[in-house]
Amino acid sequence: MRRFYKVFSKDTIGETAFPQSDKLPKTIEGRKFYLSWSHYLVLMRISDVDERHFYEIETYRNGWSKSELVRQVSSSLYERLVLSRDKDEVMKLALEGQLIENPQDIFKDPYVLEFTGLPELVTYSETELENRIIDNLQKFLLELGRGFTFVGRQVRYTFEEEHYRVDLVFYNRILRSFVLFDLKIGQLKHQDLGQMQMYVNYYDRKVKLEEENPTIGIIICKDKKDAIVEMTLPKDNNQIFASKYQTVLPSKEELKDLIEDKNL
């Protein structure tokens, strides 16, 4: 309790991030607390104030259990989101949590799939990776973030008498867009990006409703070269993304070093 007071008595956060209600308890100089004590036992161990604010907002907003909060902290969700945002958007993470307004907002690099139990070295097939994700679909949805609903796996479509299959299809209710995932256990190739472009075009032209937003395609691969992605996709691309995945929890120190390098 003493540590709780020391951490939060001087730790202010915008009240606009939480609903206002006089029925909810107040502690420490009028500040309102909405989570369980077990949640705050996790939060008070986060030394960075902005990071702690982010997890507090997201835990309340998404109704994360203590174990789900621990998983998100352990997988360095905050640092991974910071890596894909500019300085102004990083400040919003601390003040407002993760806002989902455009396709870039749902993107992470890397995706952490430690729940699959697969080894870090690639000794498995893409089918096995897909099977492990489906077996742990609830955990994968937690990794994806807010607004995702599962549509199907190996979803087939046909044109010109050719059959094609999309590995995983989701729908994001906030963006009102289909989100297609293609899994690659090796290094990303430009052909993979072209294939995803075809998937996205098909969904845009044949599947999505007129009032829905453009389809998003995300390739999750074991390794990628950013130059290949940059030269293959158009400059104004906001539909197709490529991200690495890893099957072990990332090192916070390594991610923070990457953030520092990015800000230099």
Image (cartoon, rainbow, N blue to C red):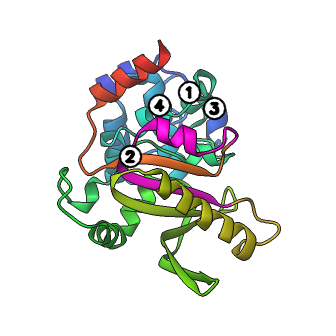
Camera-side residue: 107 or 242? 242
Q: Quadrant of residue 216?
A: bottom right
**What residue sits right under mark 4 in the picture?**
83
Give the alpha-carbon distance from disc 4 to disc 2, as whole Å: 13 Å
Q: Answer whether residue 254 is visible to the viewer in this image.
A: yes
Secondary element under disc 2, as helix, strand or loop, is strand
How many residues crowd mark 3 within 10 Å: few (<14), some (14–19), many (20+)?
few
Q: Earlier in the sequence, mark 4 or mark 1?
A: 4
Give the alpha-carbon distance from disc 3 to disc 2, as whole Å: 36 Å
Which numbered disc, 3 or 1, marks the residue closer to the eye? 1
User: Is 31 in the magenta?
Assistant: no
Determine the residue positioned at 37% across, 34% down.
Answer: 43
Determine the residue positioned at 60% across, 45% down.
Answer: 233
Q: Is residue 143 left or right of residue 128?
A: right
**What residue sits right under mark 3 in the picture?**
15
User: Is 217 in the magenta?
Assistant: yes
228 up-or-down from 194: above or below: above
**What residue sits right under mark 1 in the picture?**
90
Secondary element under disc 3, as helix, strand or loop, is helix
Give, as a three-letter code, the residue at label 1.
Val
Give, as a three-letter code, the residue at label 4.
Leu
Determine the residue positioned at 44% across, 41% down.
Answer: 109
Q: Which residues are magenta?
A: 215-236
